[in-house]
Amino acid sequence: MMKILTDFSASALIAANKANLFGYFEYIGTSSASNVEVHNSAEIKWILTGLSYAFLNNVLHTHFEAEQAGKRIEETLTHFGSRNVRYATWWAEPDARPTTLGDELTAKGLTYSRGMPGMAADLQTLKEDLPKPAGLTIETVRDEATLKKWVQPGLIGFGDTEVREGDICFDLFTGLGFGLPLRLYLASLNGKPVAASQLFLGAGVAGLYWVATVSEARKQGIGAAISLAPLLDAREMGYRIGILQASPMGEPIYRRLGFREYGYLSNYMWMNNDEQG
């Protein structure tokens, strides 16, 4: 059984946030879905999902020789383009090589991003009495029928108003099964699916991911409710710390629940210009 983190020092929370996030990406890469592709070598590790979100196409580890870095970056991006990847995130961790990796990436057209704030909370002191609308129900996704309902608010909440990639998203999570360490949650209002979230258990903490609410259901307390449900489940399983990476829209909600900021998760963003429009 994984050791549950109980160290609330800032350094421990920052490290656990990044470790949980990378663990989430790597777990997604184990999906049996045909659109998922993983490359893992001594030089580079990347994971593509087939979905058009930088959050779900990631270069996690880089260890290039300095004189080869530009060429290897170009080769990697060319491959991404051949897979019709529209957006990707390239992480340049402190142990990445060469030490000039950031400069090499920007030279190839990637844009530095300070990233989202990493946040953490003590699951024992979450604020649980926030208002929510009557008629709201939250369920765990345990089968394909419920997953089909989850996909629509999950993608619409991410801005995919036409749910163009619904089949890819469905296949991605079907290919992972319905057991831990990943658990999906669906919120319905009067029977209509309106919000989604995910729980990922890793690095001794409970990670909250993919929190999304359709636009017409926002500002009713649904975002807080669909965020709280996974965290309370993790607490029941004995976890003490919840972590997340907060979007500008979600950050005020997470603060109301009891989360505090612990640094930023900076990276480099790539957009395939050939795929614009």
Image (tube, grey):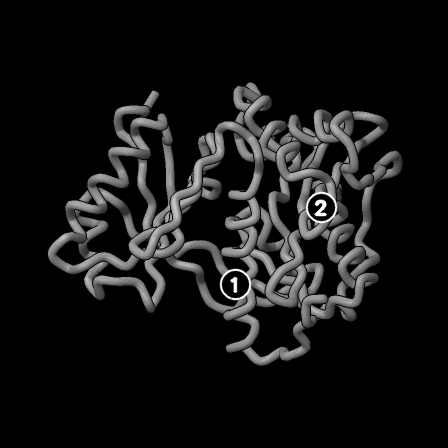
Q: Quadrant of residue 37?
A: top left
Q: Earlier in the sequence, mark 2 or mark 1?
A: 1
In the rendering, at what x and y percent does residue 119 appear? Answer: 57, 63
In the rendering, at what x and y percent does residue 13 appear? Answer: 56, 72
Q: Does the image show residue 102?
A: no
Relative to 35, 119 lies left or right: right
Say which residue appears at 29% left-offset and 33% top-offset: 79
Say which residue appears at 35% left-offset and 49% top-offset: 90
Q: Which mark is residue 19?
A: 1
- Front-most of residues 168 and 259: 168
Q: Quadrant of residue 179?
A: top right
Vertical position of residue 163 compared to residue 204: above or below: above
In the rendering, at what x and y percent does residue 134 appear? Answer: 88, 38
Relative to 101, 61 lies left or right: right
Relative to 233, 168 lies left or right: left
Spot the residue most to the right.
134
* Mark 1 residue element: helix
In the rendering, at what x and y percent does residue 36 appear? Answer: 48, 34
Q: Give neighbour class at mark 2: few <14, some 14-19, many 20+ (Cα, 10 Å).
A: many
Residue type beneath disc 1: Ala
As measured in the structure, the alpha-carbon distance from the residue carrying label 2 to the one carrying label 1 is 18 Å
The residue tagged 2 is 183
- Front-most of residues 87 and 27: 27
Residue type beneath disc 2: Arg
Quadrant of the drawing holding the C terminus = top left
Relative to 169, 18 lies left or right: left
- Front-most of residues 44 and 99: 44
Vertical position of residue 215 compared to residue 6: above or below: above
